[in-house]
Image (cartoon, helix red, strand yellow):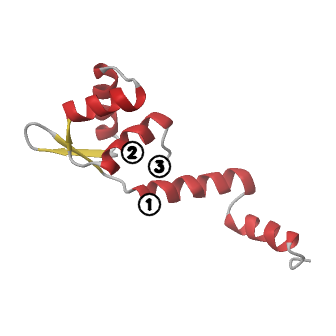
Amino acid sequence: MQLCQSEWTVLQSLWERQPQTLMQLVEDLKLRAGWSASTSKTMAARMSEKGLLRYEGKPRRYYPNVTREEAGLEETEQLLSRAFGGLDELYAILDKAAGRGE
């Protein structure tokens, strides 16, 4: 799961307060990111299709389908993979820097 900045924004809103109706989410994203109602609705629909959000009931109440911890761990692993080739490579670099990996 690779999240774009817009997806992070929506998830941040829902991690802070859940559930939210679509109108509550629209209002929060307007304040948080300056988004129009149509942008917020489109993001909620796309993220639901991707499995990042779920909704229940009428009116729809939206929930995040991924925890902050899961998203943060995935982002961290992707960053380490891009920057160092993964954790093993990072450990090797740190060991070498500390004078242990010779």
Q: Label 2, on which residue?
A: 12
On the image, which quarter does residue 98 sit in? Answer: bottom right
Tell me whether the residue at label 1 lies in contact with that at label 3, contact meaning CB atoms closer than 8 angstroms. no
Q: Label 1, on which residue?
A: 69
Q: Label 3, on which residue?
A: 1
Q: Check the picture and name the quadrant holding the C terminus.
A: bottom right
Disc 1 is placed on an element classified as: helix
Q: Which amino acid does label 3 sit on?
A: Met
Cα distance between the residues tagged 1 and 2: 12 Å
Cα distance between the residues tagged 2 and 3: 16 Å
Tag nearer the camera, 1 or 3: 1
Q: What residue type is labelled 2?
A: Gln
The image position of residue 27, as x and y in percent, is 27, 29
Q: Which of marks 2 and 3 is nearer the N terminus?
A: 3
Disc 3 is placed on an element classified as: loop
Tag nearer the camera, 1 or 2: 2
* Residue at image point 44% right, 59% down: 70
Cα distance between the residues tagged 1 and 3: 13 Å
Disc 2 is placed on an element classified as: helix
